Amino acid sequence: MSDDVVAPVATAAPATHEPPARDITDGGPDMVQFLDADGQPVALNEVNSPYAEYVDAIDDEQLRSLYRDLVLVRRVDAEGHALQRQGELGLWPSLLGQEAAQVGAGRAMRPQDYAFPGYREHGVAWCKGVDPINLLGMFRGVNHGGWDSNENNFHLYTIVIGNQMLHASGYAMGVQKDGMVGTGDPERDTAVMAFTGDGGTAQGDYNESLVFASVAHSPVVFFVQNNHWAISEPNDRQFTIPPYQRARGFGIPGVRVDGNDVLASLAVTQGALDRARSGGGPTLIEAFTYRMGAHTTSDDPTKYRIAAEVDIWKKKDPIDRLRKHLESKGLADQEWLEALDAEADELALRIRTACQQMPNPPHSEMFEKVYAEPHPLVEREREEFLAYQASFEEED
Amino acid sequence: MSASSGAAPQKMTIAKALNAGMRAAMEADSKVVLLGEDIGKLGGVFRITEGLQKDFGEDRVIDTPLAESGIMGTAVGLALRGYRPVVEIQFDGFVYPAFDQIISQVSKMHYRSQGHLKLPMVIRIPYGGGIGAVEHHSESNEAYFAHTAGLRVVTCSSAEDGYWMMQQAIASDDPVVFYEPKRRYHERGEVELGESAPHGLHDAVVRAEGSDVTLLAYGPMVKTAMIAAQSAEAEGTSIEVIDLRSLSPLDLPVILESVKKTGRAIVAHEAQTFLGMGAELAAMIQHESFYHLEAPVIRVGGYNIPYPPSRHEEVFLPDLDRVLDAVDRSLAY
Ligand SMILES: Cc1ncc(C[n+]2csc(CCOP(=O)(O)OP(=O)(O)O)c2C)c(N)n1
C-alpha cells in the first residue's frame, strides 16, 4: 500500500461541524397550518392568511370527501403492505403518515395538471384517478409500471431518486411552449407537479430541475415531502437549511406547509398551482411530515431510529386530526364513519382479489416494447427464446 | 477483532468476508474511509458495512447525502488529499448519477496529470439480478466501466475472494470498480484470515479442471458454472471453469491456455450480450487462438432488453439449462 501519494495528513481531524438541531417535531413559525393537532382551526396569521381564501372555499361536502380520501388512501397502503407480507408483492413502500400531504397536493390539481411522482405517491395517484391496482404491478414484478401516464396525467413511478424532477421541469417547458399558461381559461391553463422526498433534495437532478424551472419561469410546483428520513439517514444528512428556505437561492418562492394538515396542504398547493398556471412561475412546497412506517417492507427502522420519535408523530396523525375537525362541526356521525369503513373494506378486497388474480405475463412479453420500431436483434432473440422454450415442451 | 492474527480458516458468507476485508484494510491504514448512503447505523441496505461505523467512528464511515455524483466527486477530492475512499453505491442501477464523475474524472486523473496524481479509490457496487427486486436493482453494468480505460474492474464469487480482493482493491493505487454479486452475498466459504492473499487481484482462477470445454464466468455466474460442470461430468463431458475475477485487466494467458487445451470456449454472464464482456472475450479468443478452436466461442447472457420485471428473471438469467445447452452446441461442431 503506498502512503506516499501526498504528504501525510492528520487523520484524527477535530470535528468542527456541529450538526444543526433537527426540527423533528416542530415545523417552526413559517409553517402554514389551518388545523392544529386536535383538529381545531388555527387562527389566521401572517403565514397562513394568504391561503385562507382556499380554505374558506371548502364546503362541508368537500371536507367530508377529503376525509374519505385520507381513509381510503390509508387503506390502499395498508393493503399493499399486507399483500407484501403475504408474498403477493415483492416490495411495498408505505405512505403511512403522509396521506394528508399527498391528498392535499393531489386534490389541488386539476385534470389537465400533470404529476411526476417518486415511488411512494399512492395518495396522489388516487386523487388523479389512477386505479390503485395499477400501482401493484411493479411491486409484484409483473411490469415496470405499465399504466398509460397520459390517461390521468400521472407519470410512471420513478425509482431513481431525483430523475423525475427534471422531467417535470421539461414537461412544464413544453406546456409553456404550447401556450397553455396564463390564458385565463381554467380549463386550459396547466401546471406540473414534481414529487420527491427530503433525501431527493440532495441529488444533482433535483437541484438542476430547480435551476431550469427558475430560469425558464416554468409552470411547475415542486412538492418535497420532508418525511424526515431517507431510509436510515435523518434529514440533517441531506441539508442544513430546509428545502423551503433553499428555494430562495434558486430564485423561486418556498413555502413550508404542515403536511399532516390536509387543509393546509390543499390550500398551499392550490396557491402554488394557480400561480404556475397564470404564468407566475415555479414554487417549491416543503410538506413537513413524517414517515410513520419503515422505508419499505425490506427495511428495519429499529436499527436507526428511536421509537419515541414515532410516538410524537402518532399524535399528529392526519386522519385523526381531520376526523376531530369533522366531529366538532357535526359532519361525521358514527353511521357515516362506519359506512366509510365499509367502503374501505370493499376497496381493500377489490385490490386483494385483483392482485392475487394478476396473471404472470408470458415470458415472451419480455421482448415486447423494447423499441417502438422493429429491432432485428430483439426479434431474433425472441425467436430463439421461443424455440428454446418449445424444446422443453417437446422433451416432456 | 483483528483480521491479521493468523487464525485458522473461518467459514463465512461473502457478505461477512467483504466486511472483514474492509475492516482489515481500515485497521491497516488509517486513511481508508468509507462513504455511502445508509452505510453507518444501518450498515448498508445489505449490511456489508455492518458494525464498521460503531468501531471506526463517523469520521471514517461516513453517511453521505443521497447524491451519487456528490459521493463520487467528493471521493475524488478525498483521494487527491491522500485518503483512500471506499465508496458504496447502493444498487447497480444507481451508479449512473455518478457516471460522469467516474468516466470523466476518476478514470482519467492519473493519465491527464501524467502520473502525478493518483486516485486510490474503490467503488463498490452490489450487482446482478435474481433477488426479485424492482427496476434498477438488478443490473449488470460492468461493461460500461470495463470499456473505460483507467479503471480496474473486478468481481468476486467466493468469501475468500471477497475478503482478499477487497483488501487488494483498497491497496491499489488505481481506482477499482468492485462488483459484489448480491444474490450470492449469503453463500458461505472458507477464508484464511491473516495469511497472504492466495491470488493476485487480477488473476483468473481455474475453479474446475476439464478437457472438453472452457467455461468462462465471473461473479454470480461462477456458481452456476460450477454446477454446470458437475452435472456435465455426470454425462461424461469435462468442463473447465475459469473464474475471471478481473474484468479489466483480463488475465488472458490463463484463458488462452485453457482454450488451447479444450478447443472450445463459452462465456456466461448476466449482462446483455451485445457489446458485453462476452463479446470482448470472444473476439480476443478467436484472434489469439483461432487455430486451436474447434467451435465458435458461444455467449450465454441476458437478452438484449432492459432488465425485465422480476417475474421473468428465471428465464432472463442464464441458468444451468442454458449453460449446458451452450455446451452441447459447442460440442456439436
Ligand atoms: C439514485 C438513487 N440512489 C439510491 C436509491 C436507493 N433509495 C431508494 S429510496 C432512498 C431514500 C429516499 O429518501 P427520500 O428522498 O427522503 O424519500 P422517502 O423514501 O423518504 O419518501 C434511497 C437511498 C435510489 N432509489 N436512487
Image (spheres, rainbow, N blue to C red):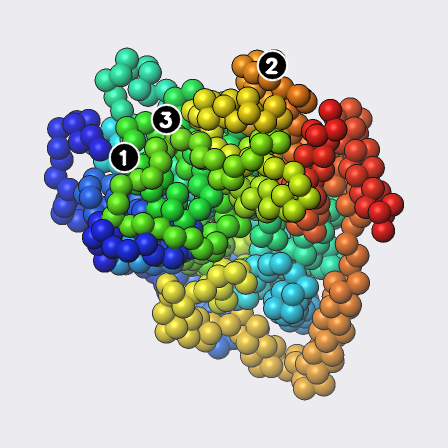
Residue labelled 2 has its Cβ within 8 Å of some atom of ligand 1: no
User: Residue at image x 46%, y 26%?
Assistant: B254
- Amino acid type for the residue under numbered disc 2: Phe
Task: Answer with left or right where residue A358 lies relative to residue A329.
Answer: right
Can you identify the residue that label 3 sits on?
B106
Of A384 and B150, the residue lying toward us: A384
Q: Quadrant of the N terminus of chain B?
A: bottom left
- Tag 1, which secondary structure? helix
Q: Position of residue B299 (x, y in %)?
A: 64, 29
- Tag 2, which secondary structure? helix
- Amino acid type for the residue under numbered disc 3: Val
Within 10 Å of the Cα at label 1, are there few (<14), some (14-19), or many (20+) other Cα atoms?
A: many
User: Of the residues under marks 3 and 1, which one precedes in the sequence?
Assistant: 3
Residue labelled 3 has its Cβ within 8 Å of some atom of ligand 1: no
Can you identify the residue that label 1 sits on?
B171
Q: Position of residue A321 (x, y in %)?
A: 53, 74
Asked if residue B298 shows in the view, the reply is yes
Q: Chain of mark 2?
A: B
Q: Are marks 1 and 2 on the same chain?
A: yes
What's the distance in space between the residues labelled 3 and 1, CA to CA?
Answer: 16 Å
Can you identify the residue that label 2 sits on?
B290
- Amino acid type for the residue under numbered disc 1: Ala
Q: Position of residue B311 (x, y in %)?
A: 70, 51
